[in-house]
Image (cartoon, helix red, strand yellow):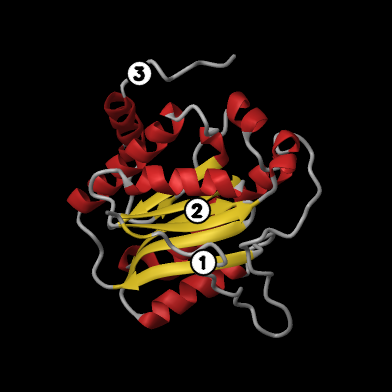
Amino acid sequence: MKIRLHSFPVTALAVALAAATLTGCAPLLIGGAAVGTAMVVTDRRTSGAQVDDEAIELRAGSRLREALGDRAHINVASYNRQVLLTGEVPSDAAKLTAEQIVSRIENVKSVVNDLATMPATSLTQRSNDTLITGKVRASFVDASDLQANSFRVVTERGVVYLMGRVTQREADRATGIARGINDVQKVVRLFEVISPNEVPQASGSQPAATPATVAPAATGASTVAPVTTGTPLPPAGPAR
């Protein structure tokens, strides 16, 4: 059953989304969300990729917790087997360790390591980040020309990261919406750009094409997946 959410005010929906996320806060955060029937049907990843992403996030959270404990505040978000690491770690060594741990997990294609070497953020900052994420998601739902379930939104210290399998038009449109949200400092785009012709096939079985913005998994002796910065789509830069 599809439920139209356009009748709900954006702010109210954002608060509801934020409240749902905050109830699960922990020093080491895992970015995965429960995938219901409607989400699976409209998600542009294959069902196999969705299952892999959930497994990657769970395994990454467990292994990072074992290795770094309370010394690090790390968010793990996997989309189509590309993993984004955000948060704070106590040292550059811990940052590298986190990347190595995640890159060794089965089915991980690449790792975007945007961890900051600094003290962990306050609960107030994390709450504000959660609210920003809720507002961005709600704005995507409210946009009649976007399919909200095609996007993954992560916010860290006011920086919004956008992931998803989208067309160039959708990428630009979503970026513009995110940049207009209050308190957003910057928008970083980590999209896999697809052609408009691929969109009708996206909710079903599509060929496993190499994503345009995902670096290939590491080969040879190295166990560290290449770190990308969202290229070839450039970061949108500071809002306003």
Tell me: 210 left or right of 184: right
Dot 2 lies on which element?
Answer: strand
Residue type highlighted by circle 1: Val
Q: Quadrant of residue 82?
A: bottom right
Q: Quadrant of residue 48?
A: top right
Residue type highlighted by circle 2: Ala
In the image, farthest residue toward the bottom: 221
Q: Quadrant of residue 228?
A: bottom right
Dot 3 lies on which element?
Answer: loop
- Real-space CA distance between mark 3 and mark 2, rounded to the nearest whole angstrom: 27 Å
Q: Position of residue 139 (x, y in %)?
A: 38, 34
For the N terminus, the quadrant is top right
Q: Could you say which is closer to the camera, residue 22 or residue 109?
A: 109
- Real-space CA distance between mark 1 and mark 3, rounded to the nearest whole angstrom: 34 Å
Q: Position of residue 95 (x, y in %)?
A: 42, 75
Residue where numbered disc 1 is placed: 112
- Real-space CA distance between mark 1 and mark 2, rounded to the nearest whole angstrom: 10 Å
Residue where numbered disc 2 is placed: 77
Residue under the point 43% across and 49% down: 175
Residue under the point 55% across and 53% down: 78
Residue type highlighted by circle 3: Phe
Dot 1 lies on which element?
Answer: strand
Please give the label number shown on residue 8.
Answer: 3
Tell me: 13 left or right of 163: left
Q: Nearer the viewer, mark 1 or mark 3?
A: 3
Q: Nearer the viewer, mark 1 or mark 2?
A: 1
> Which comes sooner in the sequence, label 1 or label 2?
2
Q: Is residue 54 visible?
A: no
Above or below — where is 99 with respect to 48? below
For the C terminus, the quadrant is bottom left
Q: Position of residue 193 (x, y in %)?
A: 63, 53
